[in-house]
Structures are given as structure tokens and as C-alpha cells.
Image (cartoon, rainbow, N blue to C red):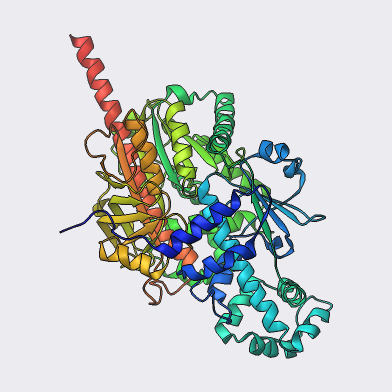
């Protein structure tokens, strides 16, 4: 029997979540140290050696990349939804503090160095479920560094060590690695995490002090999260109104994906700069891509386009790039009807508004020009918009779509594209689910996914496409352990991600006149009035320890799945919109003849 709903909960994970939410209800800041025991007992798959005296470099790197570099200087992290919340609680205008960023997480952070305060903007409970485990893991591993460095004289010498160029003397490196008990590979990963002078600075700081960070959450009511999304949406409305685009009156195709693939496929910017980008790869050889360029077939426009799209950003940001090249890219985007809202209020979620009637077959990616001349002519008469947002984290997806669905015109399609962990595939594979188990609502959502494997496979060079899959939406990337994953794997779930469940909960409320249910099997087959498409591409294999599918830079080859799935989504939108317009024209013609 194919059971849809998993039958087990992990008590250690639940205890950890209950513990930090219980403590965060306190009006006074809470010490991260009070969460360490339950964090260790959880045995997170991303921090499996938390309770070991040995360093867990994988966990340290993962957590450090999702926190600002100033985290080891922070004494108090303050979480709030918007500026008003920080002002209300007496912290002043935190946006005047020093803006800082995490390398692998989109979130607004501001640092006040005199008091060592770090303000973190949170858009939903998922931000708390993400920040707390990362912060706890970082503190545990940092304090292991402190203990190991101070178990030998190297700690004292490291704390006093200074060189003119900010590097650790070579003769000390082997001694440090030995004291830390790291393999050559793990020591290299630590060096990559903290490159150049940061390596000396952070190890010296770890030798001097232990971390004892405190945390507090302001304005934890649901209304504060809603107000932050409302302010974010108000900013989008202001920008579009200034350009004469009325969101409330136009047909809408909603996409949650990223900020580069849709625009690159539609604007033609990279193709216009083809010669410059070729020369950039040949001369600068970013990520050793020169060989890849030489091996690409002239007939393989898809793979060649992916390479151009990938190197466009480093080319524009390169020290030797010309300002007019950047302006050419922006001009191309504007010509393609793209409006970017890059600094939306409160939420660090960029939005792009794309006017379909300004798209042209000669400018778009060759993989999108398979529409007929008649269909392109119809699209010129379209009044529809594509609203693409940089995919939010967890429950922020619920708040965002709930706001959008009440403020726009008729929705004709909802397409969700995101990263996921796969339990049976390889990095670079694509999963297309039609069952989602959501840990937030405890619902199992059944729906007709408008995509099949054949929609993506023709554009995917390296991976494999699996449709008719079952996915689970988890509360946080660290809030999983091996027992948790095996329970889902035994139930046939092979796809782990964070946004699908919240999106489907908000879709339910757009379709039905009531709040989404809890702990039910929810069938969205029957009454869904528009396309629902969910596609995930694998970025992690938490159970398998096999080598990744791809031998070169994973960041570059990840482009293969990103663009294959983005092409499938845009082809679906353009085909559907052309068909909608054909129906309108046919009906109008019939009315005139009658």
C-alpha cells in the first residue's frame, strides 16, 4: 500500500524546536549556550559530530556561509521583521548601522560594532528555524577551535602572531593543522572558508576568546510578518505604477525562481555581448572554463547559451569591464519589458515584472523561439505580466503569495522552481513532484503538476529528470537527521526542500474560501483554476556519499539544471498565453460574425 503521509516524528528534533521557541518567548535575551545540549542531541545530518570534541568542518563551513563574517565579534543578535519593530523596542534605526551580508543566504543584516549588536531581518518563522541552528552550530564549532588552539602553545603564539601581509607564517600551518586534528582536505576547506588575511584574523580571535552569543526575537506576532510583506509589496506597486503598469488589472503568471535565468533567457543581453564574453573566458579563464568553451559544439546553442549566461555576471563585475557594457545589459532588459525591484522593503527578495507583449522572437534564447510566427504575433497583443521573485525561504513563501494573490488581477499560472536535496538521485538531477508533505501544516498535498519529464529532458545535458515524485517540505535544512530522512525514504519521498508546502497552503486559500487545513490529505486536482507547476533540481545528496555527478565547478554545471527548468517554465507560459489570446480573438470574431 502506498502510504501518503509519513507515520513518524523525530522526538529529538521536535524537542530542539520546542526548546528554542520556548526560550525565545522570554523578554530578555537568551544565551545560545542554553540550546547546545538539545542541538547536539538532535544529531542533525548537517552537524552529526556536534557532541564530539573533534571539529566538524562540514558544519562549521555550512553555518559560517549563512552568517555574516562579523558573527564571531557579535555579542547579541536581534531578530525583527522591519525597521519599525527595532525602533519600537528601543534599538533605533538599525539601517544606519553597518550593512553586512552572509555569503550563502539572502537576508538583511546590520552590525553595530561599538556594542557588538547584529540586527537580522526575519520574514517568517522559517528564518528563525534557519538562524538558530546555524548560530548554535557555529558557536559549538568555534569553541572547539578555541579549546584545541589553547591546548598547546600554538594558541598563545597564534594570538600574538602578526605579519606584514596578514598571512600565517608557513612554518606554523602544519603545527596548527596537527593541533586542530584536521586532514589536509579539511584544513584546505577551512582556508577556503576564511581566505587570505581572514584566516589569521579568525584563528587568532578563536585562540583568544570563546563565543557566548545571546539572541532575542522582537515582534514575533504573525501580524508583524504580514506587515513586513505588505510593505515589500507596496514598494513593488510604487515602482510599477510609476511605469504605468497596473498589477491589479493585468493577467498574471507568477514564478518563484531566481534573479538571473528568466531575464537572461528573455533579454538577449548575453548574446549581444557574445564576442566580449568569449574573449573574457579566453583571457581570464574563470573557473577553468576556457576548455569548456573550446569543447562546446557550435550547434549546441543551449549549452553555449548557458556558458554565456554564467560568465555574464563575472564579466560585468570584473575590474576591467566597461561601464557601457553594463548599460547595454540594462538597456536590453528594459527593451524586453523587464522591470527590476532590486531593493524591496524589509524582505531581501528581488522582484521582476516582465511585460509579455514586449518580448521578441529574435532576442530570446533559441530554446524559446519554437513558437510559430502566429503565436509570436498574438503575444504582441498580450496584456499579461510575468511576476518573477527570487525564491523566498520557507514560510515567507506563504506570506508572499497570500499578499500577491489578493492584490493582482487574474492569476493564470503558478510556477515554483527551487533547489532540493535528493535521496535517490545525483546532484544535477531534476525532480517533478505531484505529492508534497508539508511539515508546517502536516498536510499531504496532491495536485496535478503541469510539467512532465518530457518538458525538461530535451534541455538537460548532464542530469536525469524524474517526474511523479513525492517531496517533503522541511522546516529547516539543519532540522533533519538520518532517522528523519530514512522514515521519508521508506515512505517513497525522495525530494527534500523548503518552499513547496507553504506555497501550496497559500494556493489552497486562493482556491477555497477558508484557511488551509491541518494534518489532512488535501486534493488540489479538482478546483485549481490555473496551472500549478513545481520543479526542483538537486543540489545535495544527504544520504549518498558518492562523488557528485559533475567533475568541474559545481556552480557552473548547476547552470545546466537551472536553465533547463527555466526554459520549460517559460515555454509553458508563452504557449499558454498565446492560446489564451487565440481563444479571445476567436470569440471576438464569432461575436462580430453573429
Please state if 568 lies on the left or on the right of 72 as rendered.
left
Location of residue 191 (image quadrant): bottom right
The reply to whether residue 369 is visible in this rendering is: no
Where is 104 relative to 168, above or below?
Answer: above
Q: Nearer the viewer, residue 329 or 57?
A: 57
> Could you tell me residue 327's position as x and y percent?
62, 43
> Could you tell me residue 325's position as x and y percent?
62, 48
Q: Residue at coordinates 57% horizontally, 29% vertically from top-left? A: 234
Q: Nearer the viewer, residue 550 or 65?
A: 65
Where is 160 relative to 352, above or below?
Answer: below
Please state if 206 lies on the left or on the right of 405 as rendered.
right
Q: Residue at coordinates 31% horizontally, 65% vertically from top-left? A: 487
> Could you tell me residue 361's position as x and y percent?
38, 39
Location of residue 255 (image quadrant): top left
The reply to whether residue 439 is visible in this rendering is: yes
Of the 4 image quadrants, the one containing the N terminus is bottom left
Please state if 42 lies on the left or on the right of 164 as rendered.
left
Q: Nearer the viewer, residue 427 or 203?
A: 203
Where is 180 relative to 79, above or below?
Answer: below
Q: How many marks?
A: 0
> Could you tell me residue 256's position as x and y percent?
44, 44
Where is 334 relative to 496, above or below?
Answer: above
Residue positioned most to the left = 1
Of the 4 image quadrants, the one containing the C terminus is top left
Q: Residue at coordinates 41% horizontally, 33% vertically from top-left? A: 356
Amino acid at each position: 500500500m502506498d502510504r501518503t503521509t509519513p507515520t513518524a516524528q523525530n522526538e529529538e528534533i521536535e524537542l530542539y524546536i520546542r526548546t528554542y521557541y520556548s526560550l525565545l518567548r522570554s523578554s530578555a535575551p537568551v544565551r545560545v549556550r542554553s540550546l547546545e545540549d538539545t542541538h547536539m542531541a538532535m544529531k542533525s545530518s548537517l552537524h552529526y559530530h556536534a557532541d564530539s570534541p573533534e571539529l566538524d568542518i562540514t558544519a562549521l563551513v555550512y553555518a559560517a556561509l549563512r552568517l555574516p563574517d562579523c558573527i564571531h565579534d557579535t555579542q547579541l543578535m536581534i531578530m525583527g521583521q522591519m525597521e519599525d519593530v527595532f525602533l519600537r523596542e528601543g534599538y533605533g534605526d538599525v539601517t544606519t548601522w553597518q550593512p553586512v551580508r552572509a555569503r550563502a543566504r539572502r537576508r538583511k543584516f546590520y552590525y553595530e560594532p561599538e556594542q557588538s549588536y547584529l540586527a537580522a531581518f526575519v520574514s517568517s518563522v522559517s528564518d528563525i528555524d534557519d538562524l538558530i541552528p546555524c548560530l548554535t552550530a557555529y558557536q559549538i564549532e568555534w569553541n572547539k577551535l578555541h579549546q584545541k588552539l589553547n591546548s598547546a602553545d600554538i594558541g598563545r603564539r597564534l594570538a600574538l602572531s602578526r605579519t606584514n601581509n596578514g598571512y600565517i607564517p608557513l612554518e606554523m600551518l602544519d603545527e596548527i593543522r596537527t593541533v586542530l586534528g584536521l586532514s589536509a582536505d579539511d584544513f584546505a576547506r577551512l582556508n577556503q572558508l576564511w581566505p587570505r588575511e581572514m584566516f589569521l584574523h579568525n584563528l587568532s580571535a578563536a585562540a583568544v576568546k570563546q563565543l557566548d552569543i545571546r539572541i532575542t526575537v522582537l515582534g514575533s506576532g504573525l501580524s508583524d510578518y504580514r506587515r513586513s510583506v505588505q510593505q515589500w509589496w507596496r514598494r513593488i506597486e510604487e515602482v510599477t505604477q510609476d511605469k504605468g503598469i497596473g498589477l491589479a488589472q493585468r493577467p498574471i503568471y507568477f514564478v518563484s525562481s531566481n534573479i538571473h535565468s528568466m531575464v537572461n533567457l528573455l533579454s538577449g543581453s548575453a548574446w549581444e555581448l557574445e564576442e566580449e564574453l568569449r574573449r573574457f573566458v579566453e583571457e581570464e579563464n574563470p573557473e577553468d572554463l576556457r576548455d569548456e568553451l573550446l569543447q562546446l559544439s557550435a550547434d549546441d546553442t543551449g549549452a553555449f547559451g548557458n556558458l554565456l549566461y554564467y560568465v555574464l555576471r563575472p564579466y560585468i563585475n570584473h575590474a576591467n569591464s566597461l561601464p557601457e557594457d553594463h548599460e547595454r545589459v540594462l538597456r536590453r532588459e528594459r527593451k524586453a519589458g523587464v522591470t527590476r525591484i532590486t531593493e524591496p522593503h524589509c524582505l531581501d527578495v528581488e522582484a521582476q515584472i516582465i511585460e509579455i507583449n514586449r518580448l521578441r522572437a529574435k532576442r530570446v534564447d533559441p530554446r524559446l523561439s519554437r513558437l510559430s510566427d502566429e503565436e509570436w504575433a498574438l503575444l504582441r497583443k498580450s496584456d499579461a505580466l510575468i511576476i518573477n521573485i527570487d525564491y523566498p525561504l520557507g514560510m515567507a513563501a506563504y506570506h508572499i503569495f497570500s499578499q500577491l494573490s489578493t492584490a493582482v488581477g487574474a492569476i493564470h499560472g503558478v510556477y515554483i522552481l527551487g533547489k532540493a536535496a535528493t535521496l535517490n538521485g545525483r546532484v544535477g538531477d531534476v525532480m517533478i513532484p505531484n505529492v508534497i508533505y508539508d511539515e508546517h501544516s502536516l498536510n499531504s498535498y496532491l495536485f496535478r503538476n503541469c510539467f512532465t519529464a518530457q518538458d525538461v529532458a530535451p534541455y538537460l545535458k548532464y542530469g536525469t529528470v524524474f517526474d511523479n515524485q513525492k517531496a517533503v517540505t522541511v522546516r529547516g535544512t539543519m532540522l533533519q537527521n538520518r532517522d528523519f530522512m530514512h522514515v521519508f525514504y521508506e515512505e517513497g519521498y525522495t525530494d527534500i526542500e523548503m518552499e513547496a508546502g507553504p506555497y501550496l497552503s497559500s494556493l489552497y486559500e486562493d482556491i477555497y474560501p477558508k484557511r488551509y487545513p491541518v494534518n489532512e490529505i488535501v486534493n488540489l486536482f479538482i478546483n485549481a483554476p490555473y496551472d500549478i507547476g513545481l520543479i526542483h533540481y538537486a543540489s545535495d545528496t544527504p544520504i549518498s556519499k558518492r562523488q557528485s555527478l559533475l567533475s568541474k565547478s559545481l556552480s557552473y554545471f548547476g547552470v545546466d539544471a537551472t536553465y533547463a527548468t527555466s526554459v520549460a517554465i517559460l515555454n509553458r507560459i508563452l504557449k499558454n498565453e498565446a492560446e489564451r489570446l487565440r481563444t479571445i480573438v476567436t470569440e471576438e470574431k464569432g461575436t462580430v460574425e453573429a
